[in-house]
Amino acid sequence: MQQTHASEPALIADEQVRDVLIVGGGTAGWMAAAALSKSFYKKGRRIRLVESDEIGTVGVGEATIPAIRTFNEVLGIDENEFIRETKGTFKLGIEFVNWGNLGERYIHPFGVYGSPMADNIPFHHYWLKLRDAGYDTDLSDFSLSIAAAKRERFSRPKNIPNSPLAQMAYAFQFDAGLYAKYLRKFAEKRDVQRIEGKVSSVSLRQDDGFVESITLENGEVLTADLFIDCTGFRGLLIEGALKTGYEDWTHWLPCDRAVAAPCESNGPPIPYTRSTARKAGWQWRIPLQHRIGNGHVYSSQYMSDDEATSILLDNLEGKLLAEPKLLRFTTGRRNKFWNKNCIAIGLSGGFMEPLESTSIHLIQTGVTKLMSLFPDKRFSQSLIDRYNELTVFEYERVRDFLILHYKVNQRTDSTFWEYCRNMPIPDYLSNKLELYKTGGHIFRDNEELFGIPSWLAVMEGQNFRAQGHHPLSDAREASRLNEHLSKMKQVIAHCAESLPTHAEFIAQHCAHTDQD
Ligand SMILES: Cc1cc2nc3c(=O)[nH]c(=O)nc-3n(C[C@H](O)[C@H](O)[C@H](O)COP(=O)(O)OP(=O)(O)OC[C@H]3O[C@@H](n4cnc5c(N)ncnc54)[C@H](O)[C@@H]3O)c2cc1C
């Protein structure tokens, strides 16, 4: 019998998962490889990744949410180097244009609105109280991220006690292809072995149906204890071999296609992503250091590919840099993300369209959960069930937040938007809407990704109004409260003014050069 490593407890060495095979080298594959290599470097595990240059990657995941900074921190990545190498920019939120009604816009910011008040109820109840008392008060004035975004300014949080500047929340916009390359370098330095090749078949064990091996087109057979399926929409292992099944959410998230095309920048990059609602979907604009990423996400039931492409091309702000790329998808999730000895991470696990830039985040949390529930060769069913339970919860809560954007629209210019407004929605979302409507209540359910400020931003941004506010906020007299909130607004505006421009910040800290 093999000897157990001194640092490893109880388990017999034979039962350790020692051989991990990641199939697929897009963002998901290389994020998984980087995280595993960081934890397992020189710890007696073999981590390999198979990918096919010929097949390529989706390569359009370009905007993120702030939690990605935790991923970078855990890996020990230098943020300036990472931004430089991925030609990245900073992101303070998403501007939504034409979502409530044509001609309207709002920003869903990262970070909080206002600052905590004494009575232990969320800040927005005081803002609602002022509005109910007839004061003309704009929610967006209470967000530092919005104030900075509107001025195209940015800085990382500053260590100034009690200042809004200490709370600056941000994420990144980057070139997804360069991100995968960057992580590949990181993982290969820590002994991850990359294998170039196209998977031609997957074999299952006869006795229990676990994945036994994959075979490449050149005839090479690769076995492993644990397989991570990062093959994108194909889901070669999780679906192709294991027939896990897929829950289709198209009736709630009706967009099923995207056409993407980069264009030249028409000015310094702005520190936020823009989402402009179109007739049967929406268009993204993601500014990077060297170009703008654009795409039009739409429902094929309501719009043809040709029309979607011409809408995209008609709305580019600079010279087209590459031929438009068409992508087809079905919003939804795999019935099980972890099935036997195979875990689907990334697009192979599900896709909810890029409206709130959540896919890369779901890769991150998939990898993090895998690390915390890392199995041995017995593949305990309770461990697998726990992973699936947590992931389903996470996906469904993100799903409901995305549906909110479609549901709460007042557009009357197209059948697509009418469908969205009238469609039945999941009970959880109905309940959230009802709670907000009756008294302005918003609760964050356990580890739900989007918190109070996010729900508030979208509901109010799209004219879904609360009728009333928390009774405890009535303990404050309206004119005194108005004075207090007016000062708060001024401090936030002043803080935003004090920041360097986004372009200056990049130039000073992390501008890409051709030597990178
Ligand atoms: C239109 C659109 C816009 C998006 N925008 C965002 C965004 O702004 N923010 C965000 O967080 N996410 C976004 N996403 C999601 C994001 O792109 C993906 O989550 C991310 O790129 C992960 O993809 P992946 O690695 O799972 O799959 P892929 O990029 O498809 O990678 C699959 C890998 O599997 C390999 N492979 C497949 N078949 C085989 C085979 N037979 N043999 C060998 N190798 C194989 C491929 O070569 C490739 O390496 C977007 C997605 C789409 C569709």
Image (tube, rainbow, N blue to C red):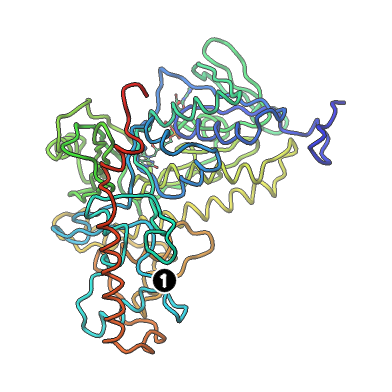
Q: Nearer the viewer, residue 267 or 411?
A: 267
Residue 307 image point, x, y percent: 16, 38
Q: Residue at x 32, y 33 (%)?
A: 511
Seen as rendered, the residue at the extreme right is: 1
Residue type at mark 1: give it: Ile
Q: Is residue 276 left or right of residue 49?
A: left
Quarter of the rendering containing residue 310: top left
Name above or below for residue 198 compared with residue 163.
Answer: above
The secondary element bearing badge 1 is classed as loop
Return the residue at label 1. 442
Residue 21, image x, y percentages: 60, 27
Q: In the picture, which quadrant includes the N terminus?
A: top right
340 sits left or right of 1 in the view = left
Q: Is residue 33 above or below residue 391?
A: above
Q: Within 8 Å: ligand 1 and the Cβ of disc 1? A: no
Task: Judge whether residue 422 can be spotted in this image.
Answer: no
Report x, y in % for residue 385: 64, 49
Residue lying at the far top in this picture: please name it.
218
The quarter of the picture showing ligand 1: top left
Q: Residue at x 28, y 35 (%)?
A: 289
| Camera-nearest residue between 211 and 394 | 394
Closer-to-camera residue (24/176): 176
Q: Residue 445: x, y in percent?
A: 50, 65
Q: Quadrant of residue 399?
A: bottom left
| Residue at (28, 58) in percent of width and height | 496
